[in-house]
Image (spheres, rainbow, N blue to C red):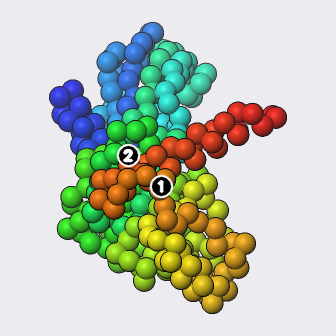
Amino acid sequence: MTRVDLLRRCAEFAESATPFVLVTLVEVTGSTPQDVGAKMIVTAQGRAAGTVGGGRVEAKAIDEAVAMLSERADCCLRDWRLKADVGMTCGGRVKLFFECVGVATWQVVLFGAGHVAQALTRLLTTLPCHVTCIDPRAEWLAKLPAGVGAIESADPPAQIETLPDDAFVVCMTQGHRSDLPVLQRIFQLGREFPFLGVIGSQAKAAVLRKELAAAGVGANQAVFHCPVGLPIGSNHPSEIAVSVAAQLLKVRDELQAAQQSSPN
């Protein structure tokens, strides 16, 4: 694989909002299986393209990269002696630079890909967050901007179990009847996200809480923002999107401030 091909693959992963680690061999000493400049792309599923030498050194590099993706790390430099650190017979030494791409510590998940979600995702892709949008309609998911993770699912509530604990979750599906199953699944599973919002009015919020109570979800458990967004702007999708993005930022900053001020 040429360097141009490898960089093209990087662009493809970035376009599809697939986090990956670019591993680059930056320095070698003695006998090593690859030359300086060799590169490899690693996703959560393992090596996706390129190579930094194969064998044990590459296996160790893949493990390191997958762990970084899991931990949402940024970048690091590893200096390995091939015999002592990797278990290879050759006595060389390698320095590998690991750079995570597309990994954001702030996760935002939207249920629904309609007009407001389209406007909101366009805003969120300009912020330091990773956005995922879940919807059963392929034609609406296809309209999302580049960089948004699109999940087509005939059963959106089933995706709740896969969401990270620190995700900011916003329900803006086709309506009350498709928002309710998402909320019900969240509360029945005992998931507690740092932010949970639902698009709609105060009247809709009252109906949702009443129906959740009928399903066995207590009032102290059914905590969510509805109407979602700050009380600014009109009902135009773009203005609603601004109000929701502003509220997400506000809550994010408040949580970060609370974490920084809390004793270790």
Q: Disc 2 designates what residue?
A: 124
Relative image position of residue 119 (x, y in whole percent):
29, 54
Q: Tag 2: residue type?
A: Leu
Q: Tag 1: residue type?
A: Pro
- Residue ID at (82%, 34%): 263
- Residue ID at (24%, 37%): 11
Front: mark 2 or 1: 1
Q: Nearer the viewer, residue 16 or 137?
A: 137
- Residue ID at (49%, 27%): 75
Relative image position of residue 36 (x, y in whole percent):
34, 15
Q: Please give left or right for residue 129 compared with residue 151 in the image.
A: right
Relative image position of residue 174 (x, y in whole percent):
34, 75
Q: Nearer the viewer, residue 121 or 15?
A: 121
Answer whether labels 2 and 1 touch (C-beta < 8 Å): no
Q: Please give the count of numbered marks on the rendered protein.
A: 2
Q: Please give left or right for residue 193 compared with residue 77 in the image.
A: right
Q: Could you say which quadrant of the image residue 98 lies in?
A: top left
- Residue ID at (58%, 39%): 253
Q: Does 132 sit above or below residue 1?
A: below
Q: Residues within 10 Å of mark 2 (few under 14, many from 20)?
A: some
Q: Quadrant of the N terminus?
A: top left
Task: Spot the residue most to the top.
Answer: 29
Which label number is shown at residue 231?
1
